[in-house]
């Protein structure tokens, strides 16, 4: 059982590369199958990832973004705010 059942996060931040045979896309699909409206933010060193995800039909109606490392803090903040629809006055 994951912590999701007890405390659903506002956003999931995922890297593409995992230490085992899975990757961030696999994890995102697993999360989104259970929580379809969960915003997903990939932070990765793989520049091709955004094109790859955007071409997958599964992600067509999902809220996701891809940021390529290194990521500026202001860019990270703006992206999280857009994905979660949080507004700072």
Image (cartoon, helix red, strand yellow):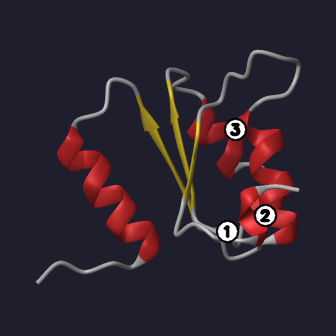
Depicted 5 relative to depicted 14: above or below = below
Query: Looking at the image, is mark 1 or mark 3 earlier in the sequence?
Result: 3
| Distance between the alpha carbons at the discs numbered 1 and 2 | 8 Å
Coordinates of residue 58 in the picture (x, y in percent): 83, 60
Mark 1 burial class by Cα count in 10 Å: few <14, some 14-19, many 20+: some
Q: Are marks 3 and 2 in contact (CB under 8 Å)?
A: no
- How many numbered badges does the structure rendering display? 3
Reading the image, the residue beneath label 3 is 52
| Distance between the alpha carbons at the discs numbered 1 and 3 | 14 Å
Q: Residue 32 got which mark? A: 2
Q: Are marks 1 and 2 in contact (CB under 8 Å)?
A: yes
Mark 2 burial class by Cα count in 10 Å: few <14, some 14-19, many 20+: some
Of badges 3 and 2, the one in the foreground is: 2
Of badges 1 and 3, the one in the foreground is: 1
Q: Residue at x 72, y 36 (%)?
A: 24
Q: Is residue 41 left or right of residue 89?
A: right
Coordinates of residue 20 in the picture (x, y in percent): 84, 17
Of badges 1 and 2, the one in the foreground is: 2
Q: Is residue 14 left or right of residue 43?
A: right
| SS label for mark 1 | loop
Q: Residue 83 got which mark? A: none
Reading the image, the residue beneath label 1 is 62
| SS label for mark 3 | helix
Task: In this rendered view, identify the residue nearer to me: 21 or 62.
Answer: 21
- Which corner quadrant of the image does residue 14 belong to? top right
Q: Residue at x 66, y 51 (%)?
A: 54
Q: Residue at x 65, y 69 (%)?
A: 38
Quarter of the image with the N terminus is bottom right
Coordinates of residue 22 in the picture (x, y in percent): 85, 27
């Amino acid at each position: 059982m994951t912590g999701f059942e007890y405390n659903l996060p506002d956003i999931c931040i995922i890297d593409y590369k995992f230490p085992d045979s899975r990757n961030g896309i696999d994890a995102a699909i697993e999360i989104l199958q259970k929580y379809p409206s969960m915003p997903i933010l990939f932070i990765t060193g793989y520049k091709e990832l955004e094109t790859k995800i955007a071409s997958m039909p599964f992600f067509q109606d999902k809220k996701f973004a891809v940021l390529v490392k290194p990521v500026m803090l202001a860019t990270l903040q703006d992206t999280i705010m857009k994905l979660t629809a949080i507004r700072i006055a």
